[in-house]
Image (spheres, rainbow, N blue to C red):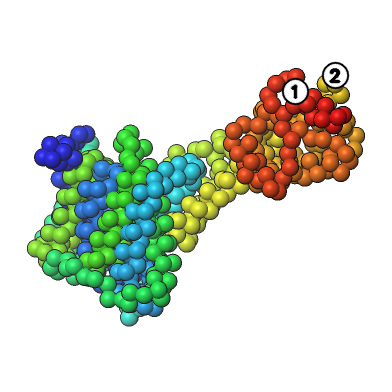
Amino acid sequence: MTQMLINLFRPKQANLKDEVLSGLTVALALVPEAVAFSLIAGVSPLIGLYTAFIIGLITSILGGRPGMISGATGAIAVVVVALVATHGVEYLFAAVVLMGLIQVLVGVLKLGKLIRLVPHPVMFGFVNGLAIVIFMAQFDQFKVEVAPGMTEWMRGTQLHLTLGLVILTMIIIKFLPKLTKAIPSALAAIIIVSLLVIFGGINVRTVGDIASISGGLPEFHLPLVPLNWDTFMIILPYSAIMAGVGLIESLLTLSLIDEITETRGSGNRECIGQGVANITTGFFGGMGGCAMIGQSLINVNAGGRNRISGIVASVGLLMFILFLSTYIEMMPMPALVGLMFMVAIGTFEWASLKVFRKVPFHDVLVMIVVTLVTVFLHNLALAVLVGVIISALVFAWQNAKMIRARKRVDEKGVKHYEIFGPLFFASALKFGEKFDPVNDPEEIIIDFQESRIVDHSGIDAINKITERYEKLGKTVYIRHLDTSSRTLLAKADKIINVNFTDDDPSYKIVEREREKIED
């Protein structure tokens, strides 16, 4: 057991210093994000901070992608706004528990592999859209409140100071690694800019101006909701959407980190880890969460490759809440804005701009649509779903055009239709157009050696062809069906009547049928 724990947390691709420092960098970046997402969801900032701690810690230990950071996210916060506003925060806690149970079930059923169905253009669009969302979200820090609920853009000295500190942060992050890699450039930038603001007496917005992060340990809390069917039906839609959004964002982030680190995580294990984390946070008064692509990229770029960095980030965040809140609240927001700007720039797939004229038009269209849906609706799950649907429809259309039929008549007067391409809903109509029942001989053989039946539409297409020939007193035989196609027809034997030959070129079954007819 001891050796297993040592192997679990032993850094394999980076040293302990990199893991710890990258974890601390992430912890600092988690504070304003968790607070902001709490305000979006309409709950206390501490709820978001506790959520980031609990989910980050559990997924770092149990998740399927070492180095990936999870916590409270905007994608989940947007989903729960209506639930909190309508039914209260206790229903949110119950919904988060159910969300976690759904995610665990997905992992146990090994459905995490479905992420393979997401085409590469969808991944490009998802990443680019998310980068734009991260970038645009930082503009709120350039506004000041002039009245309750009313803001306007900064002006004059305040704007110049904020822009200057943001640019300084970005310069440090960009160029410090060229001088030294002893400390993550993001952490160094935050420390340098914070010291400059504190000791220079520069008046800019700080973390404390957003909300206080001081608090105690999270406490176990059973959701105070009626345990009945009505409650279940209230929270189920929210839980299902949160579970789907959380898993899509987590598994796409996992794939992105896999690509960057040239390693491979476990999607099913990540589903279970996310589920356990959300169940736990629901019982400790949390708002639910998932993988955070921005913080994950900060961690990986700072040298975090293993579970230690995620654990340090989570524990560091708790330490900030318990003991260091006064100092963390002094951290200037321009430093964090500059950090997130660099994350957005690093997240954007600039290479995707070079492929516009080098890949099929429909791939470019999918990429643009997914990006636009992500940017304007801030719904990552919907964006990915739309991209997958468009890609699937394009694939179906292209395959529908591939079905062909080669025709010949053998020496016995039997006409053969040799089918090429898959027979499914999109190609069923074109398949029917290949035949000429009126002018064909008494017997025809449809050869599926180079084709297969995919779905019910394919079965129906064969049934219609058979009926057309039967009405004319002619017989259709099916030959060379693969195992899966035979299984489909066998299951549909009550709604379709098909004659089979065997695979013998002498067509013995045809001859036997002839003998029966003659007798």
Circle number at residue 354: none
Amino acid at pointer 2: Glu
Q: Position of residue 479 (x, y in %)?
A: 71, 29
* Residue 174 versus residue 232 in the image, above or below: above
Q: Position of residue 155 (x, y in %)?
A: 32, 68
Kindly check if marks 2 and 1 are in contact, taking CB atoms under 8 A apart as contact.
no
Residue bearing the label numbered 1: 508
Q: Residue at x 32, y 64 (%)?
A: 96
Is residue 66 shown left or right of residue 431?
Answer: left
Residue 420 in view = no
Q: Position of residue 76 (x, y in %)?
A: 36, 62
Q: Position of residue 133 (x, y in %)?
A: 40, 57
Residue bearing the label numbered 2: 411
Crowding around mark 1 (Cα neighbors within 10 Å: few <14, some 14 to 19, many 20+) is few
Instruction: Place residue 86 in its image quadrant.
Output: bottom left
SS class of the residue under badge 1?
helix
Q: Nearer the viewer, residue 513 or 16?
A: 513
In what quadrant of the picture does the C terminus appear? top right
The residue at the far left in this view is 323
Q: Residue at x 42, y 71 (%)?
A: 233
Spatial distance from mark 2 to mark 1, Cα to Cα? 15 Å
